[in-house]
C-alpha cells in the first residue's frame, strides 16, 4: 500500500499543480492584456516566443491588431515599414508581426489555423518569390528552425480545419522533421496521424496519454512564456492618443528627391555601398545561377495553396502582398522576366480565385531605390505596402 501511495501521490500533486498553474496564468494574462500597452510586443520582429505562440495571437487578435505575416523583409528598419508607421489616423490599430527568415507558407498556414482566428481578423500576408527558388520547397532544417510544437498540435485538433488540410500538413511535417531529425515526438505523431494501418492505430492508443499530457504542458509553457513578456511591458497610458495623418503624395515626393540624390554606378542600380559589400565579389559566381529554375513548379506553390485553403476553412480573407525583386539583378541571375511574370500571375490567380485582394508590385522591378537591396522592400516599397494596407482595410 505504501508503494502504491508513494507512486500515486506525487502524480496527484503534479496534476493539481499543473491545473492551478494553468488557471493562475489565464487570470494573469487576462489582466495584463487589459492593463499593458501591447504595441511594442506586437510589432517586435523576430520574437520567436511570440511567433510560435497561440496565446500571443489570441491576446493581440482580441486587441484589434492587424496581423502582418511574412519573413525577413519585416526586419527592414525604415520609418515607412508598416510595423513602425502604424497606427495612423484612419487606421488606429497596432500591427502585429508574425514571421522571420524562412517563415514560409507551411509555417504561416499552420499558425493561423492553430490559433483559430476569427473571420473578421485583419490579416496581410507578404509572399516572397525567394521562397520558390528551390523546387523541393522549404529546406527541412529551415522549417524546423521556426517549428512550433504547440501550433502543430493545436492545428491538428482544430475542428474548423478540414481533414484534407490536416492530412496535407501532417504529411509535410513528417517529411520535413524526419529529414531534419528534429522534434521527434511531433514527427512520430504526424506519421501516425497520416496512417490508417492497424499497427498505427494501436500505437496511437498506447501513446495517447503521453501526447495528451505533452499538449497540456505545452499549453502551460506557452502561457508562461507570454506572461513573462507581457509583465515587462509599460502600462497603458490614460492620455488620449493623437494619430499622425499621412499625406501619401507628400511622402512619395520626398522619397523621389532622396532617390535622385542617391548615386549608383553599377548595372543593377543598387547603392554603391551595397553593391561593393554584397555583390561585387560574387558577381561572376551568381551569373545565370537561377537560369534553370521553374519556380511555379516548386513544392512551395502547393504550400501556398494549402495556406489559402486554411484561410478558407477559417473564413478569413487575407490581403496578399507580392513584393518585386530587383529586375536588373534577377535578369543577371537568369530568372528572366517571363518566368517571374509567370510566378506573379500564378499567385495573383490563385488568390483571386479565392476572392482575396492582391497588391501586386511587379511593375516596380526596374525602379531604382524601391527596394533596400536585391529583394527586400526599401523606403518606397514599404510606403506602397503601408498605403495598400491602409486603403484595403479602410474600404471594408
Image (spheres, rainbow, N blue to C red):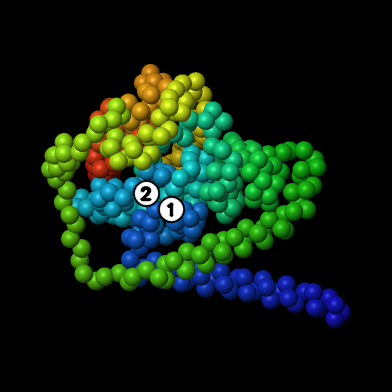
The residue wearing badge 1 is: 46
Q: Report if residue 360 is visible in the image.
A: no
Spatial separation of the CA atoms under disc 2 and disc 1: 8 Å
Check the image and name the residue furthest to the bottom: 2
Q: Position of residue 62 (x, y in %)?
A: 38, 58
Q: Quadrant of the N terminus?
A: bottom right
> Quick check: marks 2 and 1 in contact, CB under 8 Å?
yes
Among the 4 quarters of the image, the one containing residue 234 = bottom left
Residue 303 in the figure: left or right of residue 205: left
Q: Which mark is residue 75?
A: 2
Q: Residues within 10 Å of mark 2 (few under 14, many from 20)?
A: some
| Mark 1 residue element | loop
* The one of 273 and 342 positioned closer to us in this rendering: 273
Residue 95 in the figure: left or right of residue 108: left
| Mark 2 residue element | helix
Chain-order first, disc 2 or disc 1: 1
Q: Residues within 10 Å of mark 1 (few under 14, many from 20)?
A: some
Residue sitting at x 53%, y 49%:
146
Residue sitting at x 47%, y 68%:
227
Q: Position of residue 204 (x, y in %)?
A: 74, 49
Q: Quadrant of the C terminus?
A: top left
* The one of 145 and 358 positioned closer to us in this rendering: 145
Q: Report if residue 48 is visible in the image.
A: yes
Residue sitting at x 29%, y 34%:
270
Residue sitting at x 47%, y 64%:
226
* The one of 107 and 278 positioned closer to us in this rendering: 278
Q: Position of residue 281 (x, y in %)?
A: 41, 34
Amino acid at each position: 500500500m505504501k508503494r502504491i501511495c508513494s507512486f500515486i501521490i506525487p502524480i496527484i500533486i503534479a496534476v493539481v499543480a499543473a491545473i492551478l498553474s494553468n488557471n493562475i496564468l489565464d487570470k494573469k494574462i487576462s489582466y495584463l492584456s487589459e492593463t499593458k500597452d501591447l504595441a511594442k510586443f506586437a510589432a517586435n520582429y523576430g520574437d520567436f516566443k511570440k511567433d510560435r505562440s497561440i496565446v500571443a495571437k489570441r491576446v493581440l487578435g482580441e486587441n484589434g491588431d492587424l496581423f502582418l505575416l511574412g519573413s525577413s523583409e519585416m526586419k527592414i528598419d525604415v520609418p515607412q515599414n508598416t510595423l513602425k508607421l502604424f497606427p495612423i489616423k484612419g487606421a488606429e490599430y497596432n500591427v502585429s508581426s508574425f514571421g522571420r527568415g524562412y517563415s514560409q507558407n507551411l509555417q504561416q498556414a499552420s499558425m493561423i489555423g492553430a490559433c483559430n482566428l476569427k473571420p473578421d481578423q485583419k490579416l496581410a500576408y507578404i509572399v516572397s518569390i525567394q521562397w520558390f527558388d528551390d523546387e523541393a520547397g522549404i529546406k527541412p532544417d529551415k522549417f524546423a528552425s521556426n517549428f512550433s510544437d504547440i501550433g502543430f498540435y493545436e492545428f491538428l485538433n482544430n475542428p474548423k480545419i478540414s481533414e484534407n488540410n490536416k492530412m496535407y500538413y501532417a504529411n509535410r511535417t513528417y517529411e520535413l522533421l524526419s529529414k531534419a531529425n528534429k522534434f521527434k515526438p511531433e514527427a512520430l505523431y504526424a506519421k501516425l496521424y497520416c496512417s490508417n494501418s492497424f499497427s498505427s492505430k494501436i500505437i496511437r492508443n498506447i501513446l495517447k496519454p503521453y501526447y495528451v499530457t505533452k499538449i497540456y504542458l505545452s499549453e502551460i509553457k506557452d502561457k508562461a512564456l507570454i506572461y513573462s513578456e507581457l509583465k515587462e511591458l509599460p502600462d497603458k497610458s490614460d492620455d488620449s492618443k493623437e494619430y499622425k495623418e499621412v499625406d501619401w503624395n507628400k511622402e512619395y515626393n520626398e522619397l523621389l528627391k532622396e532617390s535622385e540624390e542617391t548615386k549608383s554606378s553599377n548595372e543593377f542600380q543598387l547603392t554603391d555601398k551595397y553593391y561593393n559589400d554584397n555583390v561585387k565579389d560574387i558577381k561572376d559566381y551568381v551569373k545565370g545561377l537561377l537560369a534553370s529554375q521553374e519556380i511555379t513548379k516548386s513544392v512551395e506553390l502547393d504550400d501556398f495553396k494549402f495556406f489559402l485553403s486554411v484561410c478558407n476553412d477559417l473564413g478569413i480573407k487575407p490581403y496578399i502582398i507580392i513584393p518585386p525583386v530587383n529586375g536588373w539583378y534577377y535578369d543577371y541571375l537568369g530568372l528572366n522576366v517571363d518566368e517571374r511574370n509567370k510566378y506573379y500571375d500564378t499567385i495573383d490567380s490563385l488568390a483571386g480565385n479565392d476572392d482575396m485582394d492582391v497588391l501586386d508590385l511587379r511593375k516596380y522591378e526596374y525602379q531604382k531605390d524601391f527596394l533596400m537591396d536585391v529583394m527586400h522592400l526599401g523606403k518606397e516599397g514599404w510606403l506602397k505596402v503601408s498605403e495598400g494596407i491602409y486603403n484595403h482595410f479602410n474600404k471594408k
